[in-house]
Image (spheres, rainbow, N blue to C red):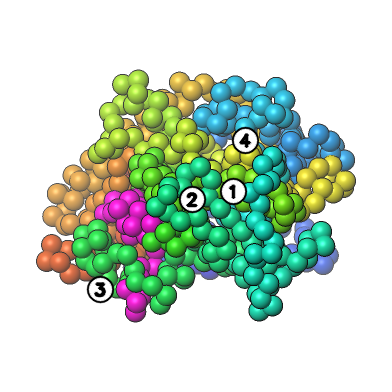
Amino acid sequence: MYTARERNSGCNVPDKYHWYPVLRKKDARLSENGLLPEQRESTWNKLHNHLFSYQNTFLGFQVNQSFDSERAKPFLDVALNNCGDPFSPSSQYATNTKVMECAVLDYFAKLWGIQQSDASNEEERAYWGYITSNGSSEGNLLALFNARDYLAGMPLNDHIVDPDSSKSPNRGDLDTNETRPIWEDNGHSVVNRSNNPRMNAYVSSHDHHTENVPLVKDNPNNFIPIVFLAEESYHGFEKALRVLQMKTFRDIGSGNFPCPLKYPDDYPSSFNDEFLDQNGWPRAVPVETDGSISIPCLVKLVTAFVSRGFPPLVVFTCGTTFKGANDNPQAAISELVPILKEHGMYERRVYSPEHPTKSDTRNGFWFHVDGALGGAHLRFLEMAINQGLVHNMFPNVFPVFDFRIPEVKSIAMSLHKWFGCPVPAAVFMMRKKDQVKPPNNPLYIGGLDSTLSGSRGGHSVLVMWDLLSKKSYDDFKEIAVSGVQMLAFSLKKLQELQKELSLDLWLSHAPGSLFVYFRQPREDIVLRYSLGSEPMKVKTVDGTFEQRIYSHICLMPHVTKNLVLRFIEELRGPGAFPIQN
């Protein structure tokens, strides 16, 4: 490890930008005999100076560095653990903050339109969810997990058995070919047609099929969810799909049937054909130039699979990782619903493996919203726009994303990003009626084992409860408007710098985003301001694609005009933008 001064030697960096020494591994090395008091104090001081110097110039990641955890500090001396379901009636682990966790969840249930008022009992509560200990990545993983089993016909937690069992399948008609996996349930041998253990064997559409669409029985595709991710979707989804052994549309379609998208006619103008495989399939749903999902491409891809009996699992994003782009779930879903109804996927009757002669009616789709960033500020920005506090910066209608859309099933939103929290945490929320039955109900944790993680930290709940108890909707609307103003200020200053330097900085900004991305500056500047960076292939005016490396700044609530001006001043210096090969 080197100090910032050593790293920047030869870069002609002004002295006022030299930083405290980086805490080195040897400075923190422990001993079997413990450390002397002066050694411990030296390490703590170096760590403090290092972290606070970088916190003061934190510009490049979507994390709010301005939060107040003072009220929660006394509870750091208590080992809090919110293990188990937050709505379990009892818990043997008494030092938990589940009461406050449920209050925070109720707040977001009303904000996102799934609950109009606080539920007085379990029957009135329309949602289920919890506060994660690992950010939205955990919420996204649980959404995929529940969606997989929901679409595969597994029993629901809030199971309502269809009273009309006369439409149950005739078991004599089921294929019992021994080459297909078979499992035993209540003494019956049931064929598993999805090639996955304990998956349902039969489905019929319910109410929404038409005479010219055949009632499909025993279609082997009926319980194989197909995942639709966009090019700009969070990179962690690929890992989640590997863990859950789920397949994307390209995994299933490529080599088995022609891609419904024809290049270049069906693709956005910014699409690079290098992303097509040998069979002409894109690796993910293409995106528009601003980074939002291409709705025409999504509709054609989903149609190709729904028409073959596959249930779709679509992930929308509010605030993509690098560009901060916002998908428009409402617009996309409004085009997908007629297709789902046409092919008997909007609602379908599912025969439960636990009750082979009984059924329930559920949807044949799952729409999840990864709102790690946008799930927080977009709702307040929408309120501000509706009240005329700020102009509508979206070219079309505002991208409504939440449970006001009846077909949205689940949302994950990080608490440490826009709101601010000292530790990673997130809200995961879904419709209670769609929750798959948890595997067990252990007495040890006092309720259903429904959360993805076992132990869950209880301190982030306290920080968030304190914040939400001190600020009103009007306060958050004001913060959202300030973010728009800070974005406009920063973009203007960068445009002025571009003109001053007579250098194309490749300035870009997605509508409604809190990010500005531009030509990557010198390495020491990237490190000093914690600038997230990413390579991109960008289509130039002559139609060719050019490899570029971009950096971005994130105008989170802690960012001030002085910090932006300080950053611009450093970009103004000689050699701030090296030539990219």
Residue pointed to by mark 1: 349
User: Foreground mark, 1 or 4?
Assistant: 1
Q: What kind of residue is marked 4?
A: Tyr
The boundaries of the magenta stretch are: 277-303
Residue pointed to by mark 3: 581
Q: CA distance from mark 2 to mark 3?
A: 50 Å
Helix, strand or loop at disc 3?
A: loop
Q: What kind of residue is marked 2?
A: Met
Helix, strand or loop at disc 4?
A: strand
Q: CA distance from mark 2 to mark 4?
A: 23 Å
| Dot label at residue 191 | none
Earlier in the chain: of badge 4 and badge 3, it is: 4
Q: Residue at x 51, y 42 (%)?
A: 207
Q: What kind of residue is marked 1?
A: Arg
User: Foreground mark, 4 or 3?
Assistant: 4
Using the rendered image of the protein, determine whether residue 298 is visible from the camera's viewpoint.
no
Earlier in the chain: of badge 1 and badge 3, it is: 1
User: Are dots 4 and 3 in contact, CB under 8 Å?
Assistant: no
User: Foreground mark, 1 or 3?
Assistant: 1
Q: CA distance from mark 1 to mark 3?
A: 58 Å
Residue pointed to by mark 2: 345
Q: What kind of residue is marked 3?
A: Asn
| Dot label at residue 127 | 4
Secondary structure predominantly adopted by residues drawn in magenta: loop
Q: CA distance from mark 1 to mark 4?
A: 22 Å
From the viewer's side, name the closer residue of 406 and 210: 210
Mark 4, residues whose alpha carbon is within 10 Å: few (<14), some, or many (≥20)? many
Mark 3, residues whose alpha carbon is within 10 Å: few (<14), some, or many (≥20)? few
Q: Residue at x 84, y 42 (%)?
A: 446
Could you tell me residue 217's position as x and y percent? 55, 60
User: Foreground mark, 2 or 3?
Assistant: 2
Could you tell me residue 21's position as x and y percent? 52, 58
